[in-house]
Image: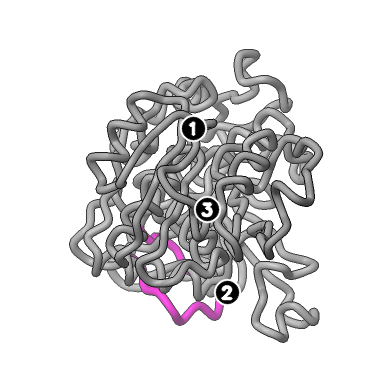
Amino acid sequence: MAETHDGAMPVPADTDMDAWVVEQPAPVAEEPLRRRRRPWPEPGPGQVRVRVTVCGVCRTDLHVAEGDLPVHRPEVVPGHEIVGSVDALGPGCRRFAVGDRVGVAWLASTCGSCRFCRRGDENLCERATFTGWDHDGGYAEAAVVDEAYAYRLPEGLPDEQLAPLLCAGIIGYRALRRTDLRPGGRLGLYGFGASAHLTAQIAVGQGAEVHVFTRSAAARRLALQLGAASAGETDAPPPAPLDAAIVFAPAGEVVPAALAALDRGGVLAVAGIHLSDIPPLSYHDHLFQERQLRSVTANTRNDGEELLRLATRLGVRSTVTTYPFAEADRALRDLAEDRINGVAVLQVGHEG
């Protein structure tokens, strides 16, 4: 059994817990998620068990469920925007105590020894593993995480607000950094879902002029409410050439339009882990005059720590739609069909 401190949460009377698993990757309409009973996980050395309170629903979960990302763990439990409380400690754990509120994000482990880890780019680790893909995630009553990769969460924000920051927020923040946007610059955001609506608030809070491009009328209204200077259709030209842009939509056909919208020396970052094929580019129209195209690969733990501090200081707030844990499959369908304005969050520990 795992070690516990005095005041530990009661050991569950039932030896099994509720969890949603990707039974067989398939289009979400074919219901690849199945609700199952699973043994309560026991933390190993250096690990903590987190009793999940809420878990954000991320587009990467959709890519895992539908098979856009290849199977790494059969019948994996998805979910990597986890907020909960530590309820058991594995041998050797010293960073957290039982009862601490923690967050669990996408990056689950790195080797620490490859050339990318040694130079500080652990997001590029050759042997990295990920929550909800290599390891069971937060669509469950509990999850186990290496304590070195868990986040101590700031006070003053409810769980439902914190969960989206742990992936949508972190990845959006890294994408923003990858653009090298100068103070006061013009930033274009293509797609305006969970990550983009958080990134917009950070950029506006730092003095950027933000322009949003999305096919959703509701998302355009939200963008303007959050301080965007303009909001138009995905293929609309910007009011003025952009200094930087981020593509959040998993649609490669957006990339040429975003590149064409850049001013000289502008940078386009692609934020998603999955993107459909990019159409042919014209060197003159899309890349000449030192325009740059960059990708974003996962995040470092430092990105996460910086984002949590910055979001707290700037008062970033998620636009949240909550779902009962029993309706995780419906939340994923709604995400696939663009019926969510902002971000979906599962209320795991709120269910009786």
> Where is residue 87 drawn, in percent x and y?
39, 60
**What label does residue 279 carry, if any?**
none
**Which amino acid lies under the numbered mark 1 shown in the image of this protein?**
Ala
**What label does residue 236 carry, if any?**
1
Judge from the rendering whether residue 328 lies leftward or rightward of residue 286; answer left or right.
Answer: left
Between discs 2 and 3, the one toward the N terminus: 2
Q: Residues within 10 Å of mark 1 (few under 14, many from 20)?
A: some
> Where is residue 306 drawn, in percent x and y?
41, 73
Marks 1 and 2, how far apart at CA? 51 Å
The residue that label 2 is drawn on is 46
What residue is shown at x 36% (from left), y 24% (from top)?
A: 217
What residue is shown at x 61% (from left), y 14% (from top)?
A: 29
Q: Which residues are magenta?
A: 85-99
Q: Can residue 8 be found in the magenta stretch?
A: no
Marks 2 and 3, how far apart at CA? 40 Å
> Where is residue 301 drawn, in percent x and y?
53, 72
Q: Is residue 56 visible?
A: yes
Comparing marks 1 and 3, which lies closer to the viewer?
1
Looking at the image, residue 178 lies above or below residue 238: below
